[in-house]
Amino acid sequence: MYKSFIYFKKFKEKVEFIDRFLLVFTVLLPFLFATSIFLADLFSSISGIILIYIFFKKKITFFKIIKTEIILMITFYLIILTSLIFTEYFKISFLASFFYFRYFLVSLSIFYLLKKYDFVITIFFYSLIFIILIILVDALIQYYAGNNLFGYGWPGSEKINLQFKYITGFFNEEKKLGSYLVRFLPLMLATIYWHEKKNTTFLSVYFLLFVGIIIFLTSERTALFLYFIICASYFLINQNKLRFMLSIILIFGLLFSLQPELKEKYVNFTINQLKGKYTTLPKKNENILRYYSYEHENLLYTSIKIFQHNSLFGSGVKSFYHECNYLKKNKPKNFTQNKRQNKLVCSTHPHNTYFQILSDIGVFGFMIMLYFLSYVILSMYKILFKHKKKDKYLLSYYFISLGILINIFPLIPSGSFFNNWICLIFSYLFGFWLFLKTQLFHKKSLYKNL
């Protein structure tokens, strides 16, 4: 309580008037991501407008230290605009393409606040802990009581081979709770290690395990897979590796044994999908190893065909469904079915970030994303294997980089890259990544070659 009073006093005395609005809007965003995407989008847009006002009203010099990243943002945005110019689906793509810059403004707003006020990261830290704890407790209430704090009950039973219940928390009918938690978990770890207290290890492990249990109960397979990637990454930097590994094995061993219906979905159903079962194909095609499932593989196949038809600038943002239908009706002469019996499947997007970028905005956008992904992975690799001493700067940057990697992980199905919910969460994390990167590279000469 005393610490809260201190930070409230700092907020009142040291934060400039216009910056107070910007700070309040950005601090509330994680809660709004879980409760109202409309308000989250609105608050993000207002934050962007405030930042533009501040930028032209005052001389902000510290944006110069991220000029490389800003150039990449502008380049990526220009590629999206170029795709909009050449697309045949201008009306469909216009809003998502033209206003895409607002996501970069969210990142820059967070970077601006963190860079200008050294205590703001602590405000983000405590507010994020509070918000995540509310979401976790609410999910547990829903699981045991049947209804959460908003009165949302279980969305119903899902049929695989057995019936089971799953939790969605604040998201009601949408299965996003696991995705939300796994996207914000690395940011939680980054801010925990930034503050470097005596109970840092305990607090980080506590959140890891608590979040993991809730993710398991959501029945979201992609979220659980990404969670295990986070656990593996944490294992590599943890000093008590054996204790941590045993804790994970014990907890998830119990969860799988106590929840056989969820085990059926996570293990058996997934294996059968990978083997190509649950399809109408002849039996000789059933045992071919698939990308996640035959349906997901068809979506990737469709995105490749769209890319081949629009390789430089793509077919346009959010045009996947329409371009797919066009190809179905007007198949090129060189269009042939492959040995894996893939076919064109029309959906809103191909359910993979990189294939969506290829099909929507073409090879140039793909190259920027691939460069960024490679940079993040290489940075994490150097922290793990080239730096023996891992202080708070390194560990915080390591975990926020992990958060970026989780959000753009290439090997698994994903939501639409141009969906506003996903874009807003990514841009939120990217703002912290920009700040922690500058703290690491510009304050610590030891890490300049990282």
Image (cartoon, helix red, strand yellow):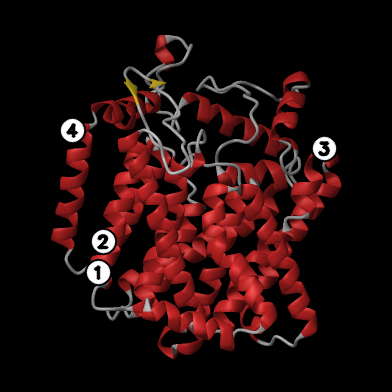
Quarter of the image that includes the N terminus? bottom left
Mark closer to the chain start, 2 or 4: 2
Q: Are the two marked residues, 2 and 4, in contact with CB atoms closer than 8 angstroms?
A: no
Element at label 4: helix
Circle 3 packing at 10 Å, graded few (<14), some (14-19), many (20+), is some
Secondary element at image label 2: helix
- Residue 257 badge: 4
Query: Which residue in the protein does label 3 denote?
Result: 89
> What x and y, as percent, mark residue 294?
48, 24
What crowding class fits label 1: few (fewer than 14 Cα within 10 Å), some (14-19), or many (20 or more)?
some
> What residue would you read off at disc 2?
205
In screen coordinates, is 361 left or right of 292? Answer: right
User: What is the distance, in whole Å, between disc 1 and disc 3 at their CAs?
Assistant: 51 Å
Give the camera-side residue of 361 and 221.
Answer: 221
Q: Is residue 378 visible?
A: no
Q: Nearer the viewer, residue 46 or 368?
A: 46
Q: Is residue 92 above or below residue 386?
A: above
Q: Position of residue 9 (x, y in %)?
A: 51, 84
Q: Quadrant of residue 239?
A: bottom left
In 3D space, how far apart are the residues under numbered discs 3 and 4 (Cα atoms)? 50 Å
Camera-near label (3 vs 4) is: 4
User: Looking at the image, do the residues carrying marks 3 and 4 touch, with CB atoms under 8 Å apart?
Assistant: no
Question: What type is the residue that disc 2 sits on?
Answer: Val
Q: Please name the residue that numbered disc 1 is placed on.
A: 201
Where's residue 385, x and y in %?
Answer: 31, 71
